[in-house]
Image (cartoon, rainbow, N blue to C red):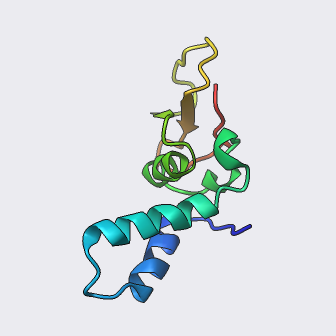
Amino acid sequence: VMAFTDLSSVVRAHTLRASEDSPPEVERLTQFEQMKSACANGDKGPFDECVGMSGENCCAFVHSCAPEVTCKLLHPGEPMMRNLDMNRVYIIVDGQDELVVKVPYRG
């Protein structure tokens, strides 16, 4: 299982290896496959890898693991729906640098 603290490190690693002649579609597919292979808990979550990432990168990571979910970025204390929705992931980010502070999970 590959663990990383920032999705950009995966993208950077891929970019360094990618041929300049590769069409963008191939590069995007390869990036998606690399991110998906990093999903330690599969598409069900929780998504432990997100803690410390930016909220946007976490959402991209969650979508690479589970494309069917809807991500919602929230700050601590913001209201959230309390109904159970297994196709929703709340991503709690701090108010200053928008880094994920809590492990996101479905529901």
Residue 24 lies in what quarter of the image? bottom left
Q: Residue at x 64, y 16 (%)?
A: 84
Residue 105: x and y in percent read 66, 36
Taking the image as drawn, is residue 17 in sight? yes
46 to 76, vertically: above or below: below
- Residue at (55, 43) in percent of width and height: 66
65 is higher (above) or lower (below) than 21: above
Q: Position of residue 34 (x, y in %)?
A: 54, 67
Residue at x 61%, y 25% (from the top left corner)? 86
Question: As drawn, is 72 to the left or to the right of 86?
Answer: left
Relative to the observer, which residue lies in front, 44 or 4?
44
Residue 74 in view, yes or no: no
- The percent position of residue 25, horizontal first and vertical second, equals 30, 66
Q: Which of 41/54 is in front? A: 41
**Considering depth in this image, is 67 or 2 the residue closer to the camera?**
67
Determine whether 88 is above or below 7 in the image: above
Please state, as top left, top right, bottom left or bottom right, where the C terminus lies in the image: top right
